[in-house]
Amino acid sequence: MGQRRGGITALLQDYAQAETRAPERAVMRLSVLDWAVCGMAGRAEGGFDTWANTLTGQGPCTRFDGRTSDAADAALVNGTLSHALDYDDTHFAHIGHPSVVVVSAALAIAEARGVSMSAMIDAALVGAEASVAVGLWLGRGHYQVGYHQTATAGTFGATIAAGRLMALGDERMRRALGLASTMASGLKSQFGTMGKPLNAGLAARAGVEAAQWAAAGMTSAADGLDGPLGFGETHHGAGDDVPFAWRMCDVSHKFHACCHGLHATLEALAQVEGLRVADMVRIETHPRWLSVCNKPDPTTGLEAKFSYAHVAAMAAHGIRTANIAQFTDACARDPDLVAWRKRVAVVGDPTLSEMQARVTVGDAIITTDLAATDPATRADRCQQKARALVGARADDLWQAIEGDDLTRFAQLLTS
């Protein structure tokens, strides 16, 4: 299917109506499991409890904090809590976390309307594909100038997912996307704070509300994305043509509890012998990561998740970066780690992709590429990660996903 006349809005409508394919559905099922365990673990951290308790809307939709509420509040809470640990999947085509936003929106609407798990997964899949397409259309300049693609592009993906489950026709879907264009927001300045996961929650809620309001008859600009003074023009969008394509199989799941920009480096560091006693560690990465996850002197656990120097120090001291419990304020301020991270030099190399890193320690030079993960390894590591986060409930969640049991799946989220 090629892009229809009408630009990005028409392309997104194509995704909303598309018949999904087995390879992408298989990856989406893993992402739904990953989303669930990240949200359950994020809730267990407890830092968002007081905030979540202020959201008291009534409805049938499950929230990680144990409440039920209307779809908009459920999407907001679940999007925020599932991104609270920054442990959810990333798509490097546009540097965004697609599932955290679209699954939160899709589950809320699916429960509100009583649809099946398989329909919810299909909606989340096309929503994720749509968010990546919008991210590609906006281009890297949008991200570099300071917008958080997870939230901005993600709002449109959430709108597509919600609108598909609500069976919006072309005209109302177009209106929903127009409404989303005036609601989408999110800034990279929030990285390292509670505002970053809130960006994801706000995007999920905006997608739900845009679809609901369009269904209720609210109108919007005929083309709120690439029309005059639309989202692209006002948000530093490149406006490049983006073909219809399936991209979900290229998503990367996180196996370290920190910014995804650090993962290729951590995979390389794991191969270095004698790292702890190294005099100097040189890390080469794509230059765009230098403005995202290169905090040289983090003082909180959240900031440590965005620091090449600190995760390298953790790796050198045998601290498992896959363990979310290790990213504490005490860890960020540990005198031994603070002293060791001064050995780390981080430089940009534009010949590396955003999924690659090169680490030099003495005579050893190791280059890693996250794109090299094969499907079998992905499934196995996702299952291992899920069990590490929530124990035996991971297997129950997977059975509910595979068994098309949305009710059981939702019940397990708050067990």
Image (cartoon, rainbow, N blue to C red):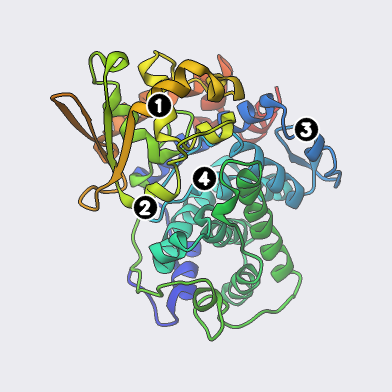
In the image, 56 versus 261, the foreground residue is 261
Total count of labels: 4
Q: Along the horizontal axis of the image, is 318 left or right of 257?
A: left
Q: Secondary structure at mark 1?
A: helix
User: Upstream in the sequence, badge 3 or badge 2?
Assistant: 3
Q: Picture coordinates of residue 316 (x, y %)?
A: 36, 17
Direction bottom: furthest residue? 228
User: Upstream in the sequence, badge 4 or badge 1?
Assistant: 4
Viewer-side label of 1, 3: 1
Q: CA distance from mark 4 to mark 1?
A: 33 Å
If the image is split into quadrants, where does the N terminus sit?
A: bottom left
User: Upstream in the sequence, badge 2 or badge 1?
Assistant: 2
The residue identified by callout 4 is: 99
Question: For residue 288, which numbered disc appears in the image?
Answer: 2
Q: Picture coordinates of residue 27 (x, y %)?
A: 40, 40
| Residue type, label 3 | Asp
| Residue type, label 2 | Arg
Residue at image location 39% in from the left, 47% down from the top: 290
The residue identified by callout 1 is: 341
Is residue 202 in sight in this rendering?
A: yes
